[in-house]
Image (tube, rainbow, N blue to C red):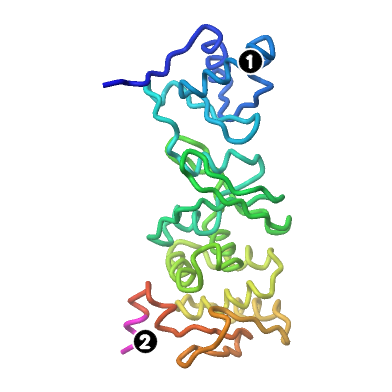
């Protein structure tokens, strides 16, 4: 049985020990070249550290350090969230990925969704499919650091996760999965914080979907909260949720929120059987 051990030569050891001493997770090629003493030596060290399983390439000139506590064997990095969050400095894990992390859904999306402030091409790293979603500056907030298998990862907070999913249903599996996510957050998220985060995004369509979904999953709004949301939605504003075309049995137009729902209640509540059963009874 051949075991690929993570050995180190003298220059490689110097680089790894120095980076570890300074608590570095993400390192640049220029830093390694500086530690190695020359461009030629530095490039050789980088190639060797990648081959031996001490470095993992994120993007050109940027690497993730796999420290000694990962063990003696070259097993790579299987922490998809850590890989995805380290590619772009200003970023956070969001949408369906964050909803799964917070336990709002039992679905485990194959793609990791990452919020960024400028467009970045999708990529696959160590088998993890990563999609970068460019968001407007006003939407780039509401995230914090979480420990994910020993790595520090920026992920949207529970309330911002719901807001992001409601803002972009297509990034969380569509309207039925979105309903499940909102229902899943009902017992975990403070409604006042959720409303504050939603209002901060400054999107009437988001508020319309939020109001409708809160009513649908029976997450009660106070009269003041309902008025606060409705006041931020122009009276002439109309949006659609669900399919492009309406079919028989669909919920249809919901005047309270100015939203045309091209989906039936049973379908939207597929993964919230408690509510579906009560409605059916």
Q: Which span of residues is magenta-colored? A: 276-281
Q: N-terminal of the two: label 2 or label 1?
A: 1
Q: Residue at x 58, y 50 (%)?
A: 114
Tell me the element at label 1. Answer: helix
Badge 2 local density, few (<14 within 10 Å), some, or many (20+)? few
Q: Is residue 270 above or below residue 33?
A: below
Residue 147 shown in magenta: no
Quarter of the figure that contains the N terminus: top left
Q: Residue at x 45, y 34 (%)?
A: 77
Q: Give the labeled residue for mark 2.
A: 279
x and y percentages locating residue 245 in the rendered image: 56, 85
Q: Give the labeled residue for mark 1.
A: 42
x and y percentages locating residue 117 in the rendered image: 70, 50
Q: Is residue 278 above or below residue 25?
A: below
Looking at the image, which residue sits at the far left? 1
User: In the depicted view, which residue is nearer to us: 267 or 52?
Assistant: 52
């Amino acid at each position: 049985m051949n075991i690929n051990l993570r050995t180190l030569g003298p220059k490689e050891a110097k680089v790894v020990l120095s980076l570890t001493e300074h608590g570095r997770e993400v390192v640049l090629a220029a830093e390694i070249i500086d530690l190695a003493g020359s461009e030629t030596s530095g490039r050789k060290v980088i190639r060797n550290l990648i081959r031996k399983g001490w470095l993992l390439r994120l993007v050109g000139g940027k690497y993730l350090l796999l420290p000694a506590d990962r063990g003696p064997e070259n097993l790579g990095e299987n922490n998809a969230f850590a890989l995805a969050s380290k590619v772009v400095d200003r970023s956070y894990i969001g949408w369906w990925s964050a909803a799964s992390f917070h336990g709002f859904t039992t679905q485990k999306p194959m793609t990791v969704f990452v919020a960024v402030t400028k467009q970045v091409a999708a990529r696959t790293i160590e088998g993890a499919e990563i999609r970068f979603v460019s968001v407007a500056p006003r939407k780039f907030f509401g995230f914090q650091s979480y420990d994910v298998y020993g790595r520090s990862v920026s992920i949207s907070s529970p309330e911002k996760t719901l807001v992001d999913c409601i803002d972009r249903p297509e990034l969380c599996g569509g309207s039925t999965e979105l309903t499940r996510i909102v229902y899943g957050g009902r017992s975990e998220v403070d409604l006042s914080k959720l409303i504050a985060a939603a209002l901060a995004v400054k999107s009437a369509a988001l508020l319309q979907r939020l109001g409708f979904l809160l009513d649908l999953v029976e997450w009660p709004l106070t009269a003041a909260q309902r008025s606060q949301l409705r006041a931020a939605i122009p009276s002439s504003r109309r949006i659609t949720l669900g399919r492009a075309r309406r079919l028989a049995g669909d919920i249809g137009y919901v005047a309270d929120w100015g939203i045309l729902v091209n989906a039936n209640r049973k379908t939207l509540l597929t993964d919230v059987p408690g509510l579906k059963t009560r409605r059916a009874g």
